[in-house]
Amino acid sequence: MSGKKTLKLKAPSETAEDTPALKKKGRGWEISEKRLDALHERARDMRRHSTPAHKALAKKFADADMGRYKFTRHAVVGSAIVDFNSHALGMAIMIDEDGQDETLAKRRDKSLEAVGIRVMRIPASDILESMDDVLKRLTIAMRECIAERKEKARAHAAANPNQHYSRPNRGAGPRRKD
């Protein structure tokens, strides 16, 4: 009979050279906790005092059954606050209000697209005047995002044939042996 085998861990001083330092700022982003807390407070205030266009689109999203592709109102993504964000789609919706700074909006869009988030800009007047056209455009954009994600997953599976992803059987509980 063999003896017990125990797991031997390296001392923290030994592993410090091998691994990069963990960034403890901004819950994964390079943002200070103070700045991130201020962004969350501002987003909370924006939710309390929404514009009519934002309220109208939020009501449509609340009434719709979109499954796992839900949109979060005034979400903090990195160092930006987006009007609506769908994490599952990797998509953000920005409502263009009158008097908005275009250069700041374009810079924010570029930074979001750099991390893989598709940004869709919708004029507030379109939402208030022709909601059906806006919803059609949103549906098309959502379908493109879903197709893009599926294609990336297929490409990843083809490039990594030895990785197997299995889902647990959710319908069946633990089996009893009688």
Image: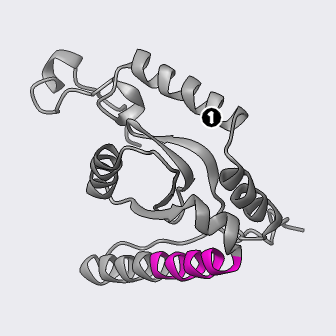
User: Where residue 48 sits: x, y (%)?
Assistant: 72, 33
User: Where residue 102 sits: x, y (%)?
Assistant: 34, 50
Q: Quadrant of the C terminus?
A: bottom right
Q: Identify residue type, mark 1.
A: Met
Q: Determine whether the residue tagged by mark 1 lies in a helix, strand or loop.
A: helix
Residue 159 visible from this viewpoint: yes
Quadrant for residue 13, please give it.
top left
The verdict on residue 177 being magenta is no
User: Where residue 62 sits: x, y (%)?
Assistant: 78, 59
Is residue 112 positioned above or below 66 on the image? above
Residue nearest the observer in this picture, 75 or 147: 75
Residue nearest the observer in this picture, 138 or 100: 100
State left or right for residue 173 relative to residue 169.
Answer: right
Identity of the residue drawn at 49% across and 20% down? 38
Q: What residue range appears in magenta?
A: 132-145
Residue 5 visible from this viewpoint: no
User: Where residue 35 sits: x, y (%)?
Assistant: 40, 20
